[in-house]
Amino acid sequence: MDHFDTEYQRLESSYNDSPPGDEDLLVYVPEGSKSQWHHIENLDLFFCRVYNLHQKNGFTCMLIGEIFELIQFIFVVTFSTFLISCIDYDILFANKIVNHSEYPSDHIKITLPNAVLPPSVCSSRIQSNGFLIFILVIASVFWIHRLIKFIYNICCYWEIHSFYVSALKIPMSDLPYYTWQEVQARIIEIQKEHQICIHKKELTELDIYHRILRFKNYMVAMVNKSLLPIRFQLPFLGDTIFYTQGLKYNFQLIFFWGPGSLFENEWSLKSEYKCMGNRLELAGKLGSRILWIGMANLLLCPLILIWQILYAFFSYTEILKREPGSLGARCWSLYGRCYLRHFNELDHELHSRLSKGYKPAAKYMNCFLSPLLTIVAKNVAFFAGSILAVLIALTVYDEDVLAVEHVLTMITLLGLGITICRSFIPDQHLVYCPEQLLKVILAHIHYMPDHWQGNAHRYETRDQFAQLFQYKAMFILEELLSPVITPFILIFCLRPKSLEIIDFFRNFTVDVVGVGDTCSFAQMDVRQHGHPAWIPTGKTEASVYQQAEDGKTELSLMHFAITNPQWQPPRESTFLISLLKEKVLRDSGSVLALHTLLPENIRFASNQSEYEPQSLIANIIAGPSSLAHCGVRNLQASQPFTAVSEVASALRSFSSVQSSQQANSGFQVPNNRIPHACPHSSMMGSGMDARTSSSGSSAWEGQLQSMIFSEYGSTEMSLHALYMHGAHQRHTQMEPERHVWHREGSDESVDSIQEDTAALSTHMSMPHSASYPLPMAQPPIEESSALQSGFQHQYGGITDAGTVHRTPGSFSHQPMGSRAEEGQSTRRQPEIVTEEGPEDGHLSQGHKM
């Protein structure tokens, strides 16, 4: 997570996602046999809309939601105008006497209509306020723009509705009960019939993910390489992260879809940005564009700030009154969502993963409550509670006490203060263990800096984790300050990075046949972007500048393979996945043997949680401490017994659970699927969704089965994430000198990078029988170290129908901004008018599995 100023090297070759020899393939279909869905020009937008309609639970739900958003905007503007111009606050606050009776001495109770001004007076006050009229005009223009966009989107989504019903054979009433993997499987299947993409005979899961997440993969890569200016060193505050929705919107506007952006359409980078010769000129143009957008943000700052304040007031005031402690709750920050996101991870997958890690993350942060602050909070709560109790007792005795000035206000503020104080008082019956909680968090979020391990009890670790998991109040404050701060970040921080941004998009963009220009990191190729400390064989062709940080490539590859068990990765990736699975399963034997040494009560507790994935992970992680008290220290000393080796035993326990599930639901697993090798893939291996496999099951039963499969897939990924982090720690401890990263001011030369790459290469060939998801047969390997296997392989063959052959020699390391012109040409898609794609949702928005 440290800042990383780096030079980028160009990737000489591009990946292809077509069979060898079919790179220029165009599928011809006779005119008479073409379907309505043949050759969809903008597949990026099409797949995004298919995904959005699925996540919004169908056309009707999406339509009603969009209508209410339009009404909500009108309500906020109208109600704010009414409060400003149509209320007599002197009467409302009883500063002016209102008496319409014949006797002035009579007391008349003030009602709300008395405080509302007549329509004529209200209209004249609005017309006399020029600033208010200006804001109303801007709001009207913005609402009309949203209305036109709404009508256009409804027409487009009606086409997607027809696609679901006629092509995918999924009625809208059943769509909420289908998982995205089931919808995606049907899209891949109908490609053979409708040829929605004419550049490929078959679509893969990775093709669809690339099109939906094309720009988000770039953002994840730029955050991973510390290219975006979102980390700052501030006086008194130290290391600070500032990344808001407004700043993110401006980044996307500049890079992807705004006027003058780097992309000519949604799938193709502009040709001038692919050449090295005019990089300085392009950097100057990009800097000028960033300056103008920053100035526009500065001019619109008052309007945006007013809207942010009003929207926050209407959104959070009711929540604050109903739940005063809600602002003391935490949420995953926008930076945390981007830092923790895998390459090729959809929104609902990320939301599900972070939601599972929310409770252990909140418990971990509660471990650091200050004892002094706890004492102060207890006493303040006592004093405030005493006063509140007296006021409540007086109110119960005589309700006229509420009519006394400021009594009701005091009751409200005292109740709010007591609630806030209670948030600083820990539960006296809870015992916190920061190290164990941090392991549970890691099992769900999958990413964690190395120096956090063993330092979970330190405040430095807590402060760094707080950048990922911030207070909700801090989130709201950052969003309110965003209109003011964003222009200065764009002008003074992003603009000086123009040349690095130009180099990044040139160096890390590859052309995939049938997909277009994508971020090369999203290919999840361990050869070109792998990290030697995260690869069991320790072999990668990537230089320091090409390696993804924090194991992003390896963990993303594992996550995508488990989430999409039907996907066939390239040979090198297949071998890595199979090797990791084999090591996890192989280590489970010793753990199961040690399990028999446990007392009956501990074993009983373990078995009780075996059927719950989250409980299973927590039980496994807590295993070492339990075993340490059972007299097995000698056995631990003879063989490393950490969370890395323990997580493997859970994989074997899945097969018995799955067998019972399959027996009850009528599932038929093909014989060529091995349950203990890949639990999730064994159940999804037939290529059919839960409803087609069990003809008698209802939609709810199918959804339940899909949720079970999703839970076991999530648990399997958690286990592998723990294993990979543990293996990475052991590897860096054995060879620390090879993995010291100079994240600031790195002066490592290209020659040293080439020497380091050459030192890693050997001459053992890869078994050609490697295929995924079946585990490949491996000769016996010494298990004294899970990472010193000595296995190396040569590259040359391609098993995935979609990867261009690359030779090591075609990958020359060039200085910053350099490019070796080899006359390679790539096929480009015809230019299509671009349209704004969907944006990320908030954490509060529900996501489907």
Image (spheres, rainbow, N blue to C red):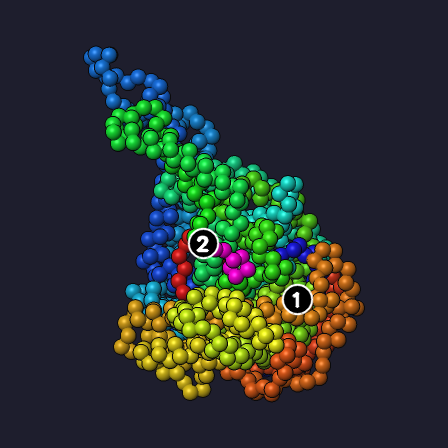
Relative to 423, residue 101 above or below:
above
Quadrant of the frame with the C terminus: bottom left
Is residue 486 rendered magenta in the image?
A: no
Left or right, 532 with respect to 362, comes to right
Residue situated in front as seen by the camera: 805 or 245: 245
Q: Residue at x 60, y 78 (%)?
A: 572
Residue situated in front as seen by the camera: 646 or 639: 639
Total label count? 2
Q: Residue at x 62, y 53 (%)?
A: 228
Circle 1: element type = loop
- Crowd band around label 1 with a 10 angstrom C-alpha radius: few (<14), some (14–19), many (20+): many
Relative to 170, residue 796 above or below:
below
Residue 554 rendering spot, x and y as whole percentages: 59, 70
Give the amino acid type for the residue marked by disc 2 in the picture.
Leu
Image quarter of residue 796: bottom right
Q: Residue at x 61, y 71 (%)?
A: 727
Task: Provide the residue span drawn in magenta.
Answer: 430-437
User: CB under 8 Å between callouts 1 and 2?
Assistant: no
Residue 41 rendering spot, x and y as whole percentages: 48, 66
Residue 69 rendering spot, x and y as whole percentages: 38, 48
- Residue 805 visible to an observer of this rendering: no
Mark 1 vs mark 2: which is more N-terminal?
2
Q: Which mark is residue 430?
A: 2
Circle 2: element type = loop
Alpha carbon distance from label 1 to label 2: 42 Å
Q: Which residue is mark 1?
A: 547
Q: Residue at x 60, y 66 (%)?
A: 551
Q: Which mark is residue 784?
A: none
